[in-house]
Image (cartoon, grey):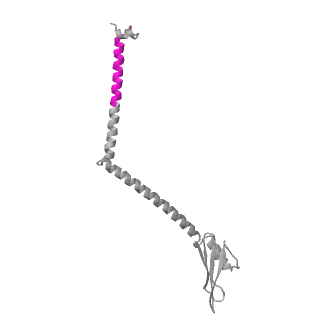
C-alpha cells in the first residue's frame, strides 16, 4: 500500500508502519515531558502558596518596603556608630590608661610606708607622677611630667619603679 504524499516527497517505498511507530514514540515522549512539566508546576505552585500563606500581594509589597526602609536605617545607624567609635578611640589615646602606685618609707627611721607615688600615663606613655613624701614635719607633694616614658627631672628609685610598672601596664 503506497501513499501519494510519500511518493511526492521521494519516500514512496517507505512502509507506513514505520511512520506510525515513529509518531507513537514521539507522542509517548511528549506525554512524558508534559507530565514532568505538570509535576514541576505543581511543586512551584505549592512553594508559591506557602510563601503567600494568608498574605495578599499588596501586604507583601508593604512588608518588603518596610524591610528595605529598616535596612537603610540600620545601615545609617551602623555608619554613625562607626564614626562615634573612631572618635572614642581617638579621644581614648589621650586618656590615662596606665596607672601604678608605689608606697614606700621615705625616711627609714620612721617605719611604715606613708609616702607614695602615683603614675598616670596615656597610650603613648605621656602623663605625670604625683609624689607625696611623709615625714615627722609634715607631708610634701610634687609632680613630675612624663613624656614618652621618660622624665626631664631625675626620678627616685620608687618613682622609676612605679613608672616601669605603669608602662608595662602592671598593677
Percent position of residue 9, x then y: 40, 11
Side (left or right) of 144 relative to 22: right
| 75 is higher (above) or lower (below) than 20 | below
Quadrant of the rendered structure where residue 42 is? top left
- The quarter of the picture where the C terminus appears is bottom right
For the N terminus, give its image quadrant.
top left
Q: How many marks?
A: 0
Image location of residue 72, percent across then percent down: 44, 56
Question: Is 37 within the magenta?
Answer: no
The structure residue drawn at horizontal position 32% and vertical position 49%, both measured from the top left corner, is 58
Q: Nearer the viewer, residue 168 or 3?
A: 3
81 or 159, nearer to the observer = 81
Magenta-drawn segment: 13-35
Residue 116 x %, y %: 61, 82
> Is residue 6 shown above or below 129?
above
Rendered view: 91 above or below 109:
above
* In the foreground, 114 or 29: 29
* Magenta span contains residue 19: yes
Between 97 and 109, the one nearer to me in the picture:
97
Q: Quadrant of residue 120?
A: bottom right
When asked about the image quadrant of residue 150, the answer is: bottom right
Res 14 visible: no
Amino acid at each position: 500500500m503506497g501513499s501519494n504524499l510519500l511518493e511526492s516527497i521521494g519516500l514512496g517505498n517507505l512502509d507506513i508502519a514505520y511512520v506510525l511507530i515513529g509518531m507513537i514514540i514521539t507522542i509517548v515522549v511528549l506525554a512524558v515531558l508534559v507530565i514532568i512539566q505538570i509535576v514541576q508546576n505543581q511543586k512551584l505552585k505549592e512553594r508559591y502558596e506557602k510563601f503567600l500563606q494568608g498574605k495578599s500581594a499588596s501586604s507583601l509589597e508593604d512588608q518588603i518596603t518596610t524591610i528595605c526602609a529598616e535596612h537603610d536605617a540600620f545601615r545609617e545607624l551602623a555608619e554613625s556608630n562607626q564614626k562615634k567609635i573612631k572618635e572614642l578611640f581617638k579621644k581614648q589615646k589621650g586618656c590615662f590608661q596606665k596607672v601604678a602606685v608605689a608606697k614606700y618609707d621615705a625616711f627609714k627611721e620612721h617605719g611604715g610606708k606613708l609616702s607614695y607615688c602615683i603614675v598616670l600615663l596615656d597610650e603613648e606613655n605621656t602623663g605625670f607622677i604625683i609624689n607625696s613624701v611623709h615625714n615627722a614635719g609634715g607631708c610634701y607633694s610634687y609632680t613630675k611630667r612624663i613624656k614618652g616614658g621618660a622624665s626631664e627631672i631625675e626620678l627616685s628609685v620608687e618613682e622609676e619603679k612605679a613608672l616601669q610598672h605603669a608602662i608595662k601596664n602592671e598593677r
